[in-house]
Amino acid sequence: MVEDTYTLEAQKEVEETFPDAKILVSTNYGRDWSGFYGMAKVAGLKNYDAVFLVHGKRTFRENRFHGDKVREALVNFMFQDTAKFRAILSRLRDHKAGIACSSKHVANDRHASNHPWLKELSKRIGCKFDEKGFDFSWGSMFAINSAVLDMMFEAITLKDFERIEQSDGLLPHSLERFPFLICEYENLRVDYL
């Protein structure tokens, strides 16, 4: 198990609950993606069949935090019952599916502010980015085939993450969408469940 923590209290709780956990404390920039990138590099996540992306960070906008209901729904989607969890894992193990995600949190990306990064990332993996828009699961919580994750993280470096306040058009928003483009490029299914 790998845990990305943001407080010493949370780290201590993880250590007590999961004594074999590998813990990486990361700088809090790049939202959940820079920490996850660091964990993937340290933990060797490509050695796994699938990885479940789960995070607890909320977005602070308009003088309040957003995201509690969405985060709770997405966590419940993946872990509410053992049968669903095993079904998701089974889909990703067949190596024909790249992502399994909630059908209730799907949007079409037409935000031009994300396109410069998406064009650059696509170029880095050798595919062409089509600006027509594409579906993705928003909220950055889904199950992903480790080969897709590896391809995604080979296209970036920690230096790519902007060290400024989060907004549309920065790398983390593009990374939320990029694995869906990789699936299209690699002819892998995205299973909306």
Image: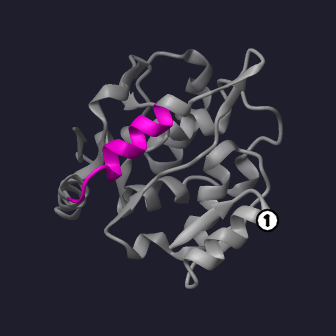
Magenta-span inclusion, residue 185: no
Is residue 132 shown left or right of residue 120?
left
Q: Quadrant of residue 75?
A: top left
| Colouring used for the render | one colour
Q: Position of residue 116 (x, y in %)?
A: 61, 28
Secondary structure mainly formed by the magenta segment: helix
Q: Position of residue 113 (x, y in %)?
A: 62, 19
Q: Secondary structure at mark 1?
A: helix
Q: Is residue 139 visible?
A: no
Residue at 40%, 25% in the rendered image: 130
Range of residues picked out in magenta? 70-82
Residue at 64%, 77% in the rendered image: 15
Quadrant the C terminus occupies: top left
Q: Amino acid at mark 1?
A: Leu
Q: For the view shown, which residue lies furthest in the right direction? A: 164
In terms of depth relative to the viewer, which is nearer, 47 or 11?
Answer: 11
Residue at 24%, 60% in the rendered image: 89
Q: Is residue 128 visible?
A: yes
How many marks overall? 1
Q: Position of residue 133 (x, y in %)?
A: 40, 19
Which residue is disc 1 drawn over? 8
Q: For the view shown, which residue lies furthest in the bottom direction? A: 20
Q: Position of residue 5 (x, y in %)?
A: 69, 60
Q: Residues within 10 Å of mark 1 (few under 14, many from 20)?
A: few
Magenta-span inclusion, residue 73: yes
In terms of depth relative to the viewer, which is nearer, 188 or 107?
Answer: 107
In terms of depth relative to the viewer, which is nearer, 166 or 122?
Answer: 166
Q: Is residue 45 above or below residue 55?
A: below
Is residue 79 shown left or right of residue 191?
right
Is residue 108 shown left or right of residue 13?
left
